Image (spheres, rainbow, N blue to C red):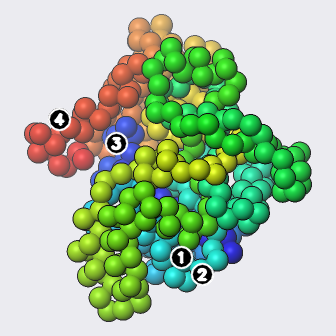
Amino acid sequence: MLHAVILAGGIGSRLWPESRQMRAKQFLSFDSNRTMLESTVARLERIIPLGQMWILTTESMSEQIEQLLPIIPNSHILKEPVPRNTAPCIGLAAARIYNECPDSTMIILPSDHIIRNENSFCQTIQFAAELVDENPERLITLGIKPTFPSTSYGYIERDKSIISNVTKKWENLTTAYTVNRFHEKPQHDKAITFIESNRFAWNAGIFVWKSITIINLIAKYEPEIGTILYQIANKFGSRDEKKFIDELFPQCKNISIDYAILERANSIVMLEATFDWDDIGTWQALDRIYAGKHDSKNNLALSSKILAIDSNGCIVRTDNPEHLFALLGINDVIIIQSNNATLIAKKENEESVRMIIDELKKRNWTEYL
């Protein structure tokens, strides 16, 4: 039985000033009128019943999610009392799902990706689930074929293709590979060599595996986290459940599922995605998402008007469709206007937007966070 776990606890600080503590990245809209979180649920609903969807978030965002998605049972909105990265929270979700359905298979995916060719996405997830049914020890990860030498994504180095009854069934869709190793975000020169080798894929952070398999692997490789999760699981369904989560979960090590499990485990399989995918990690991603909607000087205006004179390669965005951006003699600049703050940054510096957040915190300008 396939369950979906949607990760919706991050803020997305590089998308400031639109992404804030009270309106995080997953609540923003880009290529449709729906928020990215709503789009994720709608996409999954093609293959997974709503009663088998789970959302992992924080206490502070849970009420907003309940209002946005009343179709998801409140008991399936899992709340982290404090952020502890992806390994503890995925382990908590696995324990909850296993408690409800011991033979369950989980798909874990972020709430803030834009995916087109949704039929291909759903078929790829079904392919992955069947690979897990064929061998319950498998950990499936989805890899994205790189289109440029990104230094913002981790990379997966594939090894040999897998031949089995399931891969033959889906051979017209894509190929399954064993994984050689995972690589952290590289420097630009190394990213170029990765692409030229044609053996690397971007790590999309989308995984499929048996809930019991990931529980056992956490217990094996991170026994302290495993012990805490076991103690919490013993209180599922009791009046003390929330109390135990609030007391014990913060004691978990802060570690990603990649470091905790994927870089250590065997039987990892990568499916190369054939659907269009984008992670809205920074504002420059808008150039890719809205390709073809630029003016003759490669400027992009979203929900606004633009008058560009001697200006090239700029991105402007505001919620006010009547607002005019007049650009004069500037190139490769991002301008994002929100209700009480405006970001103006060179594209080459967009990865440093977090520095603004840090400075706002130092000055205690909380109204802008």
Which residue is denoted by mark 4 in the rendering?
359
Which residue is denoted by mark 2 in the rendering?
101
Q: CA distance from mark 3 to mark 2?
A: 36 Å
Residue 357 versus residue 265 in the image, above or below: above
- Is tag 3's residue or tag 2's residue first in the polypeptide sequence? 3
Marks 4 and 1: CB-CB under 8 Å? no
- Is tag 4's residue or tag 3's residue first in the polypeptide sequence? 3
- Is tag 4's residue or tag 1's residue first in the polypeptide sequence? 1
Left or right: 200 as drawn, with respect to 329: right
Mark in the foreground, 4 or 1: 1
Residue 101 versus residue 127 in the image, above or below: below
Marks 3 and 2: CB-CB under 8 Å? no
The local secondary structure at tag 2 comes to loop
Residue 316, quarter of the rendered image: top left
Left or right: 363 as drawn, with respect to 225: left
Q: CA distance from mark 4 to mark 1?
A: 40 Å
Marks 4 and 3: CB-CB under 8 Å? no
Number of numbered callouts drawn: 4
Marking on residue 326: none
Which residue is denoted by mark 1 in the rendering?
97
